[in-house]
Amino acid sequence: AVDKAVDILADDADAAKAARPCPPGTQKAHTGAVQQRPGETVCVDEHLVSEVAYHACAVCQQPVPRAQHPKKKPKGHPGFCSDGKAPSNRPIRCVSWQQANIYCAAQAANLPSEQDLRAVASTVTVNPSEWTSARPEAGHEQRAPFRCARSQ
């Protein structure tokens, strides 16, 4: 009887964990993302990280203003998002994958997987070029917007 009670309580705890809602401002990733990490609820931020939020991060490497970049930048590199002006609430688009990864870790989160983004794409506008947890190939890293995901 005790073993059966333990099994019932464990099943109830698993059901409560699976039914736990995501915090405001995030969306639960369903389907493949949940299958990839059984028993976990993944909550993906609805909005891309803003320049203001990124610049408030104490452990993040701050992008340098365009004036400090060499005259010839790699093609497609947007430089500093706010052109040296005060950061705005627009999505930050001038961070590397490593910078985005550090920011999410500082928020007790991580970069979402591609499956996580596909799972929330019907309710959240996903930018096709945003960073995911997949590390870019060496030499192919551009700068991109990103959002974070939290496992519950």
Image (cartoon, helix red, strand yellow):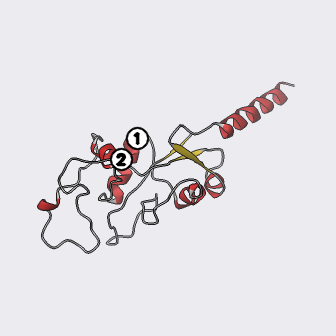
Q: Quadrant of the N terminus?
A: top right
Categorize mark 2 by other alpha carbons within 10 Å: few (<14), some (14-19), many (20+).
many
Residues under labels 2 and 1: Cα distance? 7 Å
**Is residue 41 left or right of 64 when viewed as pictured?**
right
Looking at the image, how many numbered discs can be counted on the residues? Answer: 2
Give the vertical position of 86 relative to 19 (above or below): below
Report whether 99 appears left or right of 27: left
Q: Residues within 10 Å of mark 1 (few under 14, many from 20)?
A: few
- Residue under label 2: 103
Q: Residue at x 40, y 45 (%)?
A: 105
Q: Which residue type carries mark 2?
A: Tyr
Are the residues tagged 2 and 1 within 8 Å (C-beta)? yes
- Residue 74 lies, in percent from the top left, at 23, 73
Q: Position of residue 79 (x, y in %)?
A: 23, 62
**Which residue is drawn at the image coordinates 61% and 55% (left, top)?**
33
Q: Where 2 sits versus 62, above or below?
A: above
At 53% from the left and 54% from the top, the residue drawn is 124
Task: Give the quadrant of the C terminus.
Answer: top right
> Which percent across, then down, holds residue 51?
30, 49
Tell me the tag on residue 107: 1
- In this view of the protein, which residue sits in the foreground, 28 or 7? 28
In what element is the residue under mark 2?
helix
**Which residue appears at 35% of the width and 48% of the height?**
50
Kind of residue at disc 1: Gln
Q: Name the secondary structure under disc 1.
A: loop
Identity of the residue furthest to the right in this view? 1
Q: Position of residue 42 (x, y in %)?
A: 57, 46
**Residue 35 position (above or below residue 18):** below
- For residue 57, the mark is none
